[in-house]
Image: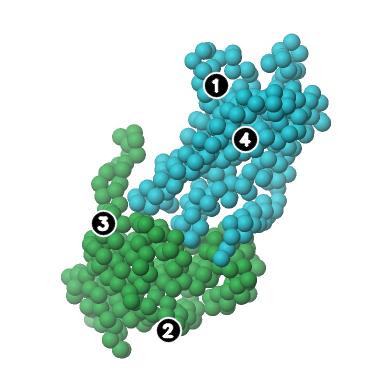
Amino acid sequence: MDRIVFESVRKVFRHRPALFNWVGRERGGETVALKDVTFSAASGEVLALLGPNGSGKTTALKLISTILLPDGGSVRVGGADTRSDETAVRRQVGIAVASERSFFPRLSARENLNFFATLDEVARGERAGRISDVLGDTGLEEHAETLVMKFSSGMYQRLGIARALVKRPSILLLDEPTRSLDAATAARFWTTIRRLASQGTTVLVATHNFAEGAAVADRVLLLHRGELLADRHMRDGESADGLRAFYFGLTGETDEAQSTIHRAEAAR
Amino acid sequence: MTSTLDKLRAILWRDLLTAIRYRSGFVLSLVGILIELAAFYFLSRAIGPGFRPDGVEYFPFLLVGTGIYTFFVMSAQAFLNAVQEAQQTGTLEVLMTTPTPAVELLTLSAISAFAGNVFNLFVYFIAGITIFRAAVHPNFLSCFLVLIFCVAIALALGLVAAMLQVALQKGSSLLWLIGSALWLLSGTTFPIQTLPRPLEMLGRAIPFSYAIDGMRMALLDGLSIRAMAPTLAALAAFSVVLVPLALAGLSFSLRQARQNGTLSFY
């Protein structure tokens, strides 16, 4: 059974300029963040939402987590509709957002996790053990008692992932999860993700990193300006370059990074 | 399953730890209370003993008026700050992904804020009575009942402040406006009978005037529950109507913010 069902989902952000905006340059209008996007994800699948900035990846994750509500279509999580049964949805979903500072700065890492675990309705007797587990999984054991205002960007990022994991969600949403992580921590993190998937957790990763998508995903959803261009099963051994070529072939855009590399090689 | 009591404990613990770790804030707020009381004390001396609003000395009149007024405004401010901080740090969106409904979360947070504000109110009254010798004749049961209704009305005001912050992202300006209107209309520093008739009528239609009046009757005049039954009934009616309305308003504004994608705007 599909854990996540996106059916013809449309999301529009309307811009309403401030009152008395004669001197400002803000204009009204709207941005269509997602245009009739349809896809589903099964138990134990790892999906990468791949696309450039503004393609709608984060919006899709926010719609699944009920932070946003769709303007058209429906989003169902474990059979529950995000519009009408948000509590049932929230019990299943853990999200690690890209925003680094979404913690209480004067609490330690352990105290923050305990606070969010309580609101996530993790049973009291299980909290301490789970918190120790996720601190271990994210390499933060040594910093468990440090006030998070003293954390680096990478540590915030790891704590965000720990917070998403502590409720043991059946659906895990990750927004640019390795953006501030060093290579070793990122590798360990992906191992954890694959282990969770093998235990039945559905994982959605929003990323613009082709290497990341190729390394970890079972399927890649290519998003471009709010449209789902392709829903591609990753073949064994498919490389990041293959995925990259496929993406630029679909969009018709120029791969600036590759062009720069080719120009540099030609110049040598 | 986690109970509401368990969540309340987690919120109280978070706020206690945060308050302790902002070491100087607690001491500074106590000093602020003493300075404010000193200013009101000398103001009442400058005006002289001839001015006896509602038949009581001016300093105790001011003590109750400004104490309750500050309690209302600080309680609303606490809600506003909770929402603003959560918007600025990004915790609001994350909190909205937990199974704990946002309204329950905010209300539980408010209990923590109210505990601090009730403590400050006690310190304010006790300092006014012991240091500045305000003459009081308290009926403690009446005082307790009025305080309960004050908390309910402050809860409604706080929920409205949170709703305005979520809906308009400018809750602080509106709270300033509401605070100024309350200062004028609720009899904080002078009896509302002094106001022009239309403003006096307006003053009599808002719950804050009843709360301030009620506390003056209970603390300064020592009126029994029976003697102040009409005021208590009015406060009860305001509480029963305003709290559910404010809760519904906040729920609506949060849903609208999720629809419009403005939850984290500030």
The number of numbered badges drawn on the structure is 4
Disc 2 and disc 4 in contact, CB within 8 angstroms = no
Q: Which residue is identified by label 2?
A: A198
Q: Are marks 2 and 4 on the same chain?
A: no
Quarter of the figure that contains the N terminus of chain A:
bottom left
Task: Name the residue tied to disc 4.
Answer: B150
Mark 1 in CB contact with mark 2 (< 8 angstroms): no
Could you tell me the amino acid type at mark 3? Gly
**Distance of mark 4 from mark 1, alpha carbons?**
16 Å
The residue beneath circle 1 is B204
Tell me the kind of residue under disc 4.
Cys
Proximity of marks 3 and 2: CB atoms separated by less than 8 Å: no
* Image quadrant where residue B182 sits: top right
Q: Which mark is residue A72?
A: 3
Is disc 1 in the same subunit as disc 2?
no
Task: Measure the alpha-carbon separation of dots 2 and 4.
Answer: 55 Å
- As measured in the structure, the alpha-carbon distance from the residue carrying label 1 to the one carrying label 2 is 66 Å
Q: Residues within 10 Å of mark 3 (few under 14, many from 20)?
A: some
Amino acid type of the residue that numbered disc 2 sits on in the rendered structure: Ser
Dot 3: what SS? strand
Q: Indicate which label's residue lies in the foreground, 1 or 2.
A: 1
Other residues around mark 2 within 10 Å, as few (<14) / some (14–19) / many (≥20) = some
Decide which of B15, B186 is in the foreground and name it: B186
Q: Secondary structure at mark 1?
A: helix
> Which shade is chain A?
green
Circles 4 and 1 on the same subunit = yes
Residue at 73% over, 24% down: B223
